[in-house]
Image (cartoon, rainbow, N blue to C red):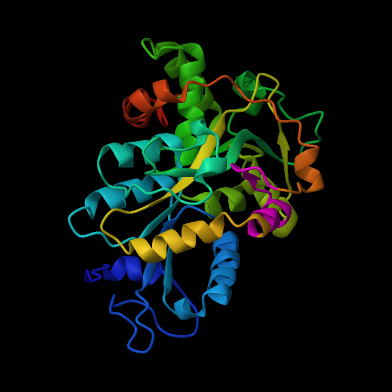
Amino acid sequence: MKRRLLMAGALATVLAVGTACGGGGSDDAAGGTEQLTIYTARDKKVTDFVVAKFTEKYPEYQGKVEILNIGAQEILERVRAEQANPQADVWWGGTQQGLSAGAAEDLLAAWQPSFAGKMDEKYKDAEGRWFGEILLPEVIMYNNAVLTPEQAPKDWDDLLDPQWKDKIIIRDVAASGTMRSIYASMIQRLSPDGSNPQPGYDWLKRLDANTGSYAANPADLYLKLSRQQGVLSAWNLQDVLLQANQANMPFGYVMPTSGAPVLVDGLATVKGGNSEGAQKFIEFLFDDSLRADLAKDFFQIPAVEIAEQPEWLSQLDLRPMDVDWNVIAEHETEWINHWNSQIKNKG
């Protein structure tokens, strides 16, 4: 099998799950189980929970699962850079457009899992190279220790109001699949076919003028917002609820009146990796009872219907924005590069 050549810097951030020491890439002498390396954009609480359940069901993987928690865009860039010598087996957590790019670049392995037939065609790749796991509505996030629901902005355009100058904190956009999707959606809603992004650029420049700082990562975003270094942000609903209910963060959310961009957030088997372990892990992720637990305890909206929905999900007033993800997939890199070089910190 392939040798693992994870760099020392990456290894320092990898969480080795289990009691035995992972890494090295050699088969286990006793059981012959190959190590499973997962690049994920999922919250660490979710990955810890899922991997513990996975190794409980498949004890041969105890100590042989490595998790690298990084941003969705960073996963694409890393898998792309490692194409000649893949280091990951599973790409867990990526936008539809990011996964589609990975598929187009021949980075992902095609296969047909048992759950594929139950999944809406729009939530999966036609050739079986990636599959949607959860749906992520993008919402307005606010510090509810400072703002009441009545005071919080009601729609995206409200974020441009001068009253919010320097009171908005944004997760650094270029490295974040969530933020890239939100910003691209703001451009595409003003240019449906993507041919004239300038109105969207103008909108983002006005948002930049109200942005007090850009957070390096989600943890930095949560810390800054909880410390009232700002009172508003734009983020995905699942993480807002997760931080509010499990980490006791003072966060609330607004479902924008004009609609929330709803991302298909998925996963894939990395081509050239440990396909047997990757497929076993992905099949496990779509177990109905696990999906129910993830919906109830981690506020996930599953891409495949589950038998019993938790109360919060059944009562969710979801208002999807009309977004053309194909247009965004075509233009996102160009748009975000322009934002990064011409708009960020210039508003």
Q: Nearer the viewer, residue 152 or 277?
A: 277
Residue sitting at x 50%, y 32%: 121
Count of numbered badges drawn on the protein:
0
Rendered-image quadrant of the N terminus: bottom left
* Residue 192 point in image, percent of width and height: 46, 12
Q: Nearer the viewer, residue 166 or 50?
A: 50
* Residue 158 point in image, percent of width and height: 65, 21
* Residue 95 point in image, percent of width and height: 45, 39
Asked whether residue 248 is in view, the answer is no
User: Is residue 107 within the magenta segment?
Assistant: no
Q: Is residue 117 above or below residue 16?
A: above
Residue sitting at x 37%, y 30%: 336
Q: Residue 289 appears in which quarter of the rendering?
A: bottom right
User: Is residue 305 within the magenta segment?
Assistant: yes
Q: Nearer the viewer, residue 297 or 271?
A: 271
Judge from the rendering whether residue 184 lies leftward or rightward of residue 147; answer left or right. Answer: left
* Residue 101 point in image, percent of width and height: 32, 37
Q: Is residue 171 above or below residue 218?
A: above
Q: Residue 40 appears in which quarter of the rendering?
A: bottom left
Residue sitting at x 40%, y 61%: 278
Outermost residue, bottom direction?
30
Q: Nearer the viewer, residue 156 or 46?
A: 46
The range drawn in magenta is 290-306
Q: Is residue 338 above or below residue 179?
A: above
Q: Is residue 130 above or below residue 284?
A: above
Rendered-image quadrant of the C terminus: top left
Judge from the rendering whether residue 27 lies leftward or rightward of residue 319; answer left or right. Answer: left
Asked whether residue 241 is in view, the answer is yes
